[in-house]
Amino acid sequence: MSSSSPSPFAHLPEPPYYVVAFSSCRTDRDDGYGNMADAMVELASRQPGFLGIESARGDDGFGITNSYWRNEDSIRAWKAVVSHAAAQELGRERWYAHYRVRIARVDRAYGFDCPG
Amino acid sequence: MSSSSPSPFAHLPEPPYYVVAFSSCRTDRDDGYGNMADAMVELASRQPGFLGIESARGDDGFGITNSYWRNEDSIRAWKAVVSHAAAQELGRERWYAHYRVRIARVDRAYGFDCPG
C-alpha cells in the first residue's frame, strides 16, 4: 500500500473470511478522536488475522467501518484488545453516542473497476 | 421510523440475517446520482426480505452502504432487480469508479446507546 495516497479499498483474499461491521454516530466531542481512530486502525492492522479495513463517515456524523478478518478467533482477540484499550484510556463512550456491531461471515465477493 | 429525522441506524431483528457490504468510490459525475441513490433505497425497501440499510460517504468520495436481508434468496432477487434497473437506465458505471460487494451472514450483533 502506498503511503502517499492509499486506496480506501481493502485488498482481500478470496472468501470465506469475516467482517465486523461497525456503525456509529459521533458525539460532538472531538477530544482526541482522530488520534484514537488512527491508533485503532494501526492497532488492528498488527493483529493476527487482520485482512483489511474500510471506513466512511458523512457530515451528519454517521459512519461505517467494515474491518475484515481471517476467522472468528482473530475477531475475538481483537475485541479483547479493544476492550482493554478502551478500559485504559480510549473510552468509546466519549466519542460515540450510539454504535452497532455486526459480525458476519463473508461467503461471496465481487467488484468493478472503471476501465482506464 | 420518523420521516422528519430518521435514524441512520437500521433496526434489525436478532441474527441470523445477511448483509450486503457495498463499498464504492464515486466518479466526479453528479448527473442524477442523488436521485438514483434515493430510488435504489426506495426500491430496496420494497423488496421481500429487506431488513434495513445504513450508508455513509466521506468528502473523499469513498462510501459504504451495508444493506441487511432476511436470507440469500432475497439478496439474489435484489441483485436481479438492481441489474435490471441498471441495464435500463441507472448504470452504476456512470457514478462509480470502483466498487466492491461482499455478501455475508451475520451471526452476532451488539451495540451501545448513550444513556440520556
Image (cartoon, coloured by chain):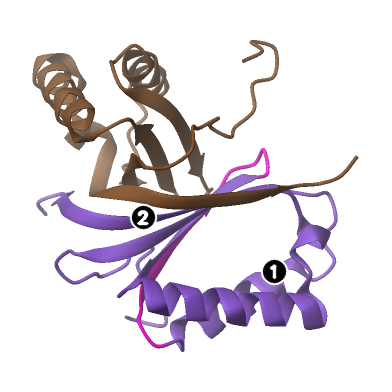
Chain colours: A brown, B purple
Mark positioned earlier in the residue sequence (2 or 1): 1
Residue A115 in view, yes or no: yes
Q: Is residue A56 above or below residue A38?
A: below
Residue B24 in view, yes or no: no
Residue type highlighted by circle 1: Gly
**Residue B43 image point, x, y percent:** 55, 84
Q: Assess disc 2: are there few (<14), some (14-19) or many (≥20) residues with their C-alpha within 10 Å of its C-alpha.
A: many
The kind of secondary structure element at disc 1 is helix
**Residue B97 image point, x, y percent:** 77, 47
Q: In percent of the image, x 60 and y 82: which residue is there?
A: B81
Q: Assess disc 1: are there few (<14), some (14-19) or many (≥20) residues with their C-alpha within 10 Å of its C-alpha.
A: few
Residue type highlighted by circle 2: Ala
Give the residue pinned by disc 2. B104
Discs 2/1, front: 2
| Chain letter behind tag 1 | B
In the rendered image, the quadrant that contains the C terminus of chain B is bottom left
Q: In percent of the image, x 44 and y 31: which residue is there?
A: A53
Q: Which residues are magenta?
A: B48-61
Q: Front-most of B2 and A111?
A: A111
Give the residue pinned by disc 1. B34
Q: Is residue A10 above or below residue A97?
A: above
Is residue A57 in the magenta section? no
On the rendered structure, is B31 left or right of A57? right
Of the numbered discs in the image, which one, if any, rests on residue A16?
Answer: none
